[in-house]
Amino acid sequence: MQARRFDLIAFDWDGTLFDSTAIITRCIQEAVRDVGGTVPTDAAASFVIGMALPQALAHAAPDVPRERYPDLAARYRLHYMRHQNDIVLFAGVLELLRALKQQQILLTVATGKSRRGLDEALRVVELQGLFDSSRTADETAGKPHPRMLHELMREFDVAPERTLMVGDTTHDLQMALNAGCPSVGVGYGAHPHGEFAALQPLFVAHSVRELHDWLLAPA
């Protein structure tokens, strides 16, 4: 099976497994508006998805003074909390994860979310026991720094060439390049898939079904 080329698969979270891009984009825009900054376009707000929150908000709101960053982050969290129950897994994600788990592939998460935010999401009953480990931006370096992947590979003693990063942003694919790992891009998330080619993904999936079929295709 195709997945047996890899011992460990690291998934991004938002925009890759969870259908959250539109909500996060709106929350960023509302937070910037709340503190009096120039509201970013949809494209500018969605570009920062996957980064660590402080870095993402600073990039999305360059005219907001640095001393207002804590307020900006607080407003983002407030708006996100109001909508977090509206965010669901993409259709087909559970079936994909369960199929990979049956092949004894190590499944991990490498995300720009906070540890608290990821842990809350992982409490969903259907997800319990599916992931072997995870890293978040507030406990290690944010993307595209390779530390998340380095730590996951070290935790399970897996070589870079046996580790696959799956994500919906150029930050994810650049992190994989920086870590020496192959990657797969998904074209249904935050970043236009046309930006992926320079980052050399093995494949670009335009739906969860395409991702499923590629990962689980006979070799």
Image (tube, grey):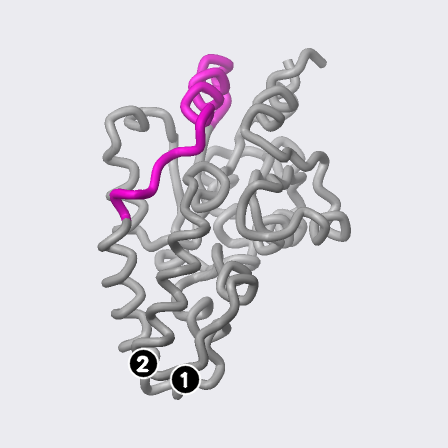
| Type of amino acid under label 1 | Val
Q: Quadrant of the N terminus?
A: top right
Q: Which mark is residue 85?
A: none
Residue 66, x across and y down, in percent: 38, 85
Query: Please, what is the three-letter code of the amino acid marked with disc 2?
Result: Val
Q: Which residue is mark 2?
A: 35
| Tag 2 secondary structure | loop
What residue range appears in magenta?
84-106
Name the spot of residue 126 as percent of width and height, x first. Answer: 29, 24
| Dot 2 and dot 1 residues touching (CB under 8 Å) | yes
What label does residue 64 carry, if any? Answer: 1
Rendered location of residue 212, percent (x, y): 57, 23
Q: Residues within 10 Å of mark 1 (few under 14, many from 20)?
A: some
**Relative to 9, is 174 on the left or the right?**
right
Residue occupying image coordinates x 27% and y 69%: 75
Q: Earlier in the sequence, mark 2 or mark 1?
A: 2
